[in-house]
Image (spheres, grey):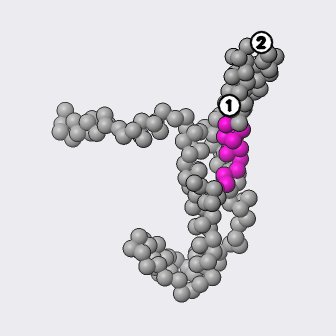
Amino acid sequence: QTELELLAKQKKKKKSLMAKVFTNLPFWLSHQLSNKFLDSDMAFLHFQEQERGKRADYFMPAPSDRCISALRKWISIYTSDDVLGPLPPPLPRSAMFDRWTQHTSHCKHCQQGLVTLQKIRRSSYATLALSVLGINKHWVPKITALLSLGVWRIVSKLENSFRVGEFKHYENH
């Protein structure tokens, strides 16, 4: 083996804790977590874009914005004037965070995840019903009923995240 192959083999062995966690998550869950992260800035960026469209004197002072400036300069030199064109009207929040249309309806992993969660929800209903039948006889059915309600609530929130991806900064604490 060459030195390069040995180095590549060593690098493959060393995985960070986050890499280990994310490689063991189902694809649909990593998609949901990624979407939650991306949603955190979506509304802000959308409305900043709208504001920038209204102001011709907009200045991007940060060094990280040089790429954007260079792209705009390249577009103005090498393309027609209509490429950048006017911005579309602002999107309502319901369209901006429509996760079903933007992602879930096209993603086989998320569709499979949604089916799995629906099965888990039905199982938690059945478990809850069976627990309620024996609730007066022992403490185990009471705990099982509470756990079933907890699972039902978590699954319901996850199911909803396949349809709507709302993010409100004031709720992020």
- The disc labelled 2 sits on which kind of residue? Lys
Q: Nearer the viewer, residue 37 or 153?
A: 153
Q: Nearer the viewer, residue 128 or 79?
A: 128
- Residue 156 counted in the magenta span: yes
- Describe residue 58's horizontal placement relative to residue 85 as left or right: left
Boundaries of the magenta span: 154-167
- Crowd rating for badge 2 (residues with CA inside 10 Å; few <14, some 14–19, many 20+): few
Q: Is residue 37 above or below residue 86?
A: above
Q: Is residue 5 above or below residue 67?
A: above
SS under mark 1: helix
**Residue 61 point in image, percent of width and height:** 43, 79
Residue 43 in sight here: yes
Mark 1 or 2: the one toward you: 2
Most distant residue in the right direction:
133
Q: Which quadrant does the N terminus fall into?
A: top left
- Describe residue 75's horizontal placement relative to residue 158 as left or right: left
SS under mark 2: loop
Residue 85 in sight here: no
Q: Nearer the viewer, residue 51 or 157?
A: 157
- Residue 148 counted in the magenta span: no
Rendered image: mark on residue 151 = 1
Mark 2 lies on residue: 137
Disc 1 vs disc 2: Cβ atoms closer than 8 Å? no
Quadrant housing residue 144? top right
Q: Which quadrant does the C terminus fall into?
A: bottom right
- The disc labelled 1 sits on which kind of residue? Val
Whole-Å distance between the Cαs marked 1 and 2?
Answer: 23 Å
